[in-house]
Image (cartoon, rainbow, N blue to C red):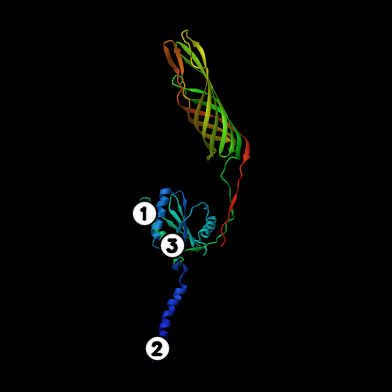
Amino acid sequence: MLGRFVCWCIALVVAACPNVSTARQAPRHALEHWRVVLTILGDASPEDTRAVLASIHDHLRTTNVVLTVATNTGAHATLRPQLAWARVLADQHDADAVLWLEMTSGDFLLYLVEPTQGRLMMRTVARNHASRIATFESLGIIVRSVVTALAAGQKIGMVPVDFERPEPRVVEPAASRAGWPRLRLTTGYAGNSFATSIPWQHGIEITADWRVRPPLYLGAGYRGVFPSRFRSDEVEIELQRNPINLHIGYHGDLKHDFAMELEVAGTVDLTTRRTIRHGPIITSVGRSIRPVPSASSWLRAHWYPVSNLSIYVAIGFEVMLYQFTYVLARPDGQSVLVAPHTLRAQVAAGFSYGFLTRERRVHKRKIRPKKN
C-alpha cells in the first residue's frame, strides 16, 4: 500500500516538471506588455498619416503591445544614423522595439528594430493605387503580425546589426536678426480720408521709436501734410495740418525676414485755416488755428532686406475725439464748407532703420542620448 502511494507521487512530480521548465523558459515579452515606439517618415499628407495610425492602433488593440507615437525630429536620410537614433528613441521611451514607416510616393518601407538584441527587420508594403483604405488595412495587418511574433520571442527573419551611439547634437537657435535696435527712425508716405469736400490728404511722416523692452516700443511722430484747398464761388480757403502723436506698439518677428507690428497712438492735430479769397458779403470763415485730438491704430508689416533696415506698409484708422466744421457765414445764414470725417481710413509706406543694436542672448543646448 505504501509503495503504491510513493509511485503515484513520483508520477505526479515527473508529469509536472515539463510545465515548470516551460514556464521558466517562456519569453519575458509573453508575460508582460511589450512597448513599441512608432515614427512615420516621408511626405505623406496629414490625412494619410492619421489613417495609417488609426489602422495600426485598431489592429494592435487586442494585443499586449503598448504603442507610442513619436515625432521624426531625429530622423536621418541614411540607415546607419537612423539605427543609432532608433536606439535613442528606445532609451527615451523605455521601449523594447522601434518601428518606423517610410511613406513615399511608391511602396511603403516598414522597419522594425530591436536595439537591445541588435536586430533589424525590413518589409515592403505594396501600395494599392486603386484603394488607399486597402493599403492602410494591409499595413495594419503586417504590423500586427510582425510585432506580435517578435513579442512572442520569434526571430521572423531579423538580421543582426551594429548600433552606434550618435554624437551629441548642438541645436542652434532659429535664424533671426542679430539683435534688437533700441532706437529706430522711420520716414515715409502717409495719407487718410479727411472730409467729403477734401476726400484725401497726404504727406511725409517722420517717427522715432525706443524699444523699452522687446517686443514693446514707445515713440513719437510728426506728419507734415501737404496743404489742401477748398474753392467755391464765394470763398477759397487753404487747410494746413500738422499732426503730432505719441504711440506704443508691439513688434513680432516672423519667418523669412518679415515682422508685424500693432500700434496705437494719441494725436494732436494743429490745423491752420487760411483764407485765400472771399467775397464782400462774408463776415467770418471760422477760426484760424484749431488743435484737434484724435486716436488711431496701425497694423504694419516689415520686410528686412538687410540687417536693421526695413521696408514697411501699413493700414489703420483714426477716430476724431472732437468734431468741428468750417462754415461760411453770411448775413442771411451760414453754409458748411468742410466737415471732417469722424472715422478716417489711413495708409502708410516707407523705410525704417535701427540704431544702437543690443545683441540677443543666444543659448545653445546639447541633446545627448540616454545611457543604458
Tag 3 near tag 2, CB within 8 Å = no
| Number of residues whose C-alpha sits closer than 10 Å to that of mark 3, classed few (under 14), some (14–19) or many (20 or more) | some
Label 3 close to label 1 by CB (< 8 Å): no
Of labels 3 and 1, the one closer to you? 3
* Vertical placement of residue 34 versus 338, above or below: below
Judge by depth and name the residue closer to the eye, 249 or 200. 249
Q: Secondary structure at mark 3?
A: strand
Reading the image, the residue beneath label 1 is 134
Looking at the image, tell me whether mark 3 or mark 2 is earlier in sequence order. 2
Residue 61, percent across and down? 39, 60
Task: Assign a secondary structure to mark 2.
Answer: helix
Amino acid at dot 2: Phe
Name the residue beneath numbered marker 3: 65
Residue 139 visible (yes or no)? no
Identify the image quadrant of residue 196.
top left
Q: CA distance from mark 2 to mark 1?
A: 63 Å
Q: Quadrant of the N terminus?
A: bottom left
Dot 1 surroundings within 10 Å: few (below 14), some, or many (20 or more)? Answer: few
**Among the 4 quarters of the image, the one containing residue 140:** bottom left
Q: Which one is earlier in the sequence, the residue at label 3 or at label 1?
A: 3
Picture disc at residue 178: none
Residue 337 x %, y %: 45, 16
- The tag earlier along the polypeptide, 2 or 1, is 2
Mark 1: which amino acid? Ala
The kind of residue on which mark 3 rests is: Val
Question: Is residue 1 at least partly visible in the picture?
Answer: yes
What is the count of numbered marks? 3
Residue beneath disc 2? 5
Distance CA(mark 3)–CA(mark 1): 23 Å
Select label 3 or label 2 by which is in front: 2
Name the residue: 39% across, 59% down: 59
Which residue corresponds to the image point at 54% horizontal and 34% vertical from the top-left?
248
